[in-house]
Amino acid sequence: MTWAFSNISSSVYQNSADLSAQNSAIYSLAFNSDGTKMYANGKGDTAYTYIYQYSLSVPYDIDTKTYEKYITINNVFRLFHCMSFNDEGTKLYALSFNSLRQYSLSTPWEIDTVLYENAHSFTPEDSNTYGFYIKPDGTKIYTAGANNDNVYQYSFGTAWDAYTISYDGKNFDTLSQEDRPYSIRINPDGNKMYVMGGANNTIYQYSLSDIWDVETSTYDGINFSVASQTSDSLGLTFNADGSNFYVTQSADSPIIYQYTTVTPKAPMISSVRDANRVPAMLATLNSDGISPVAVKVNPTSHALKALDGTDGSNLPFETSQRDNNRVTTMWGVSSADGITPIPIYCDIDGNLLIQST
């Protein structure tokens, strides 16, 4: 699945969820394959940790969570910095500092059916490994080493079997952007990498010229700060299509944060024009592609009509192509202040869409 967004900096904070009813400190987060289940790791006492299971009435929307159950797992570190499942929900992988533990689930996605299988230590490369990402086919794993400021690349000898992990001898230094990388994610195409750390509370975006090869990473000069929500960012998790991501904290906090990478849009046809402050719309002339031209909306069909700069006729959007008629950009003004420009869109059916403010 190819992610629709290409620039993490355009992300928008959406909402948060408080899991304090289960635990006062939540460190890592995971979802099942369709986003209807959420799993959160909470700090334990002495030599164990908790994993909580929730159902989501709206897939991947943490605001719609319902608590279901939990398990207690032996763990001298009392927490997992990162968790992940295989696509079938039959394997769980959980990381505490440098130790990756593998569990099987006798009933897919049911956390109370886990059974410990084996483990792998990342100590030879970095003794403070906080985050990891497993390639969708289970043949590669990438880790974030906070001691040496590096992302490391490993291979599974047998897909999804942690006992067969071996270091590829490949790494990428993140020090120029982040000197404490805590979390790493790679898109499903293997050509974009996202690293978040505790030093700057910022997500940095990289390109991989050779897919799935971290040594070919280069910084895109693109980043997104979560500092307005937290000063102790730890875990970064994306949903399946990359339209949302989630951040947990390294401080003892039960709050998790949700963001969207897709610009929110609201259907114009379901709202009142005056209330949304869309008094005028502009496109560009066919003749030069620059000069502004008025855009009108049919009040009955809601189809977009633009004044054509060549012959002066009104061309209905639904019977012409956008590029030919140069209706490339339209603007309204923000409902928040009635002044700030905001883009207006039109779908393939001619319905007008306005960016939510």
Image (cartoon, rainbow, N blue to C red):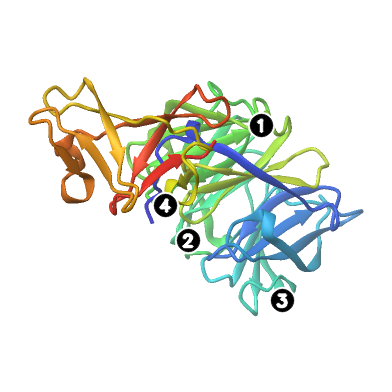
Disc 1 and disc 2 in contact, CB within 8 angstroms: no
Q: Amino acid at mark 2?
A: Gly
Disc 4 and disc 2 in contact, CB within 8 angstroms: no
In percent of the image, x 65 and y 30: which residue is there? Answer: 201
Q: Which mark is residue 113?
A: 3
Q: Residue 43 placed where, x, y %? A: 83, 51
Residue at label 2? Answer: 138
User: Secondary structure under badge 2?
Assistant: loop
- Closer to the eye: label 1 or 3: 3
Q: Amino acid at mark 3?
A: Thr
Disc 4 and disc 3 in contact, CB within 8 angstroms: no
Tell me if mark 3 has few (under 14), some (14-19) or many (20+) residues whose alpha carbon lies within 10 angstroms of its own. some
**Mark 1 or mark 4: which comes first in sequence?**
1
Residue at label 1? Answer: 147
Is 118 on the left-hand or right-hand side of 251? left
Tell me if mark 4 has few (under 14), some (14-19) or many (20+) residues whose alpha carbon lies within 10 angstroms of its own. some
Q: Amino acid at mark 1?
A: Asn
